[in-house]
């Protein structure tokens, strides 16, 4: 099963944002030691920031992708998150991942769809 970072990577690539993705993925050993987090958690943090930045600064038209691609990507991402939430064990070992998936789902669902933005 894919991790949350690879789901973000897939969604951002669908939206044509490979450049942002590549520069945000760089991490250092010092960062990991200081924050005491895994590389995947570190990348997830930067991907959250990239999504927030895109939401605030880029109108949909500037993404140079069709509305269908954006909407299809959102639906696919939400479906993968739902599937992952259903397959996670219910014990405390996956609590962090489950919470991260829920926040991600809320973030994606809160995005204004292109059709709703035009209405």
Image: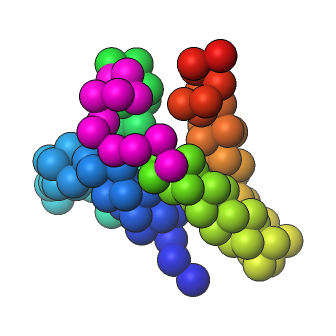
Residue at image point 21% right, 44% down: 20
Residue 7 at x, y = what percent? Answer: 48, 64
Quadrant of image for the N terminus = bottom right
Look at the image and give the residue range highlighted in magenta: 58-68
Q: Is residue 5 visible?
A: no
Instruction: State the colouring used for the structure image.
Output: rainbow
Q: Is residue 45 magenta?
A: no
> Relative to 95, is 103 above or below?
above
Left or right for 89, reference 63 = right
Indicate whether 107 appears above or below 77.
above
Q: Residue at x 59, y 62 (%)?
A: 76
Decide which of 68, 90 is in the foreground and name it.
Answer: 68
Horizontal and vertical percent for residue 82? Answer: 74, 63
- In this view, 57 is above or below 4: above
Q: Nearer the viewer, residue 34 or 43?
A: 43
- Is residue 67 inside the magenta stretch? yes
């Amino acid at each position: 099963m894919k991790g949350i970072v690879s789901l973000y990577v897939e969604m951002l690539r669908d939206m044509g944002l490979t450049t942002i993705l590549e520069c945000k993925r760089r991490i250092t050993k010092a960062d990991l030691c200081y924050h005491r987090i895994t590389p995947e958690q570190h990348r997830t943090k930067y991907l959250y920031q990239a999504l927030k930045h895109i939401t605030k600064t880029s109108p949909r038209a500037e993404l140079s992708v069709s509305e269908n691609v954006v909407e299809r990507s959102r639906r696919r991402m939400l479906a993968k998150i739902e599937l992952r939430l259903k397959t996670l064990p219910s014990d405390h070992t996956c609590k962090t991942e489950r919470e991260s998936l829920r926040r991600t789902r809320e973030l994606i669902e809160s995005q204004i769809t292109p059709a709703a933005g035009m209405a």
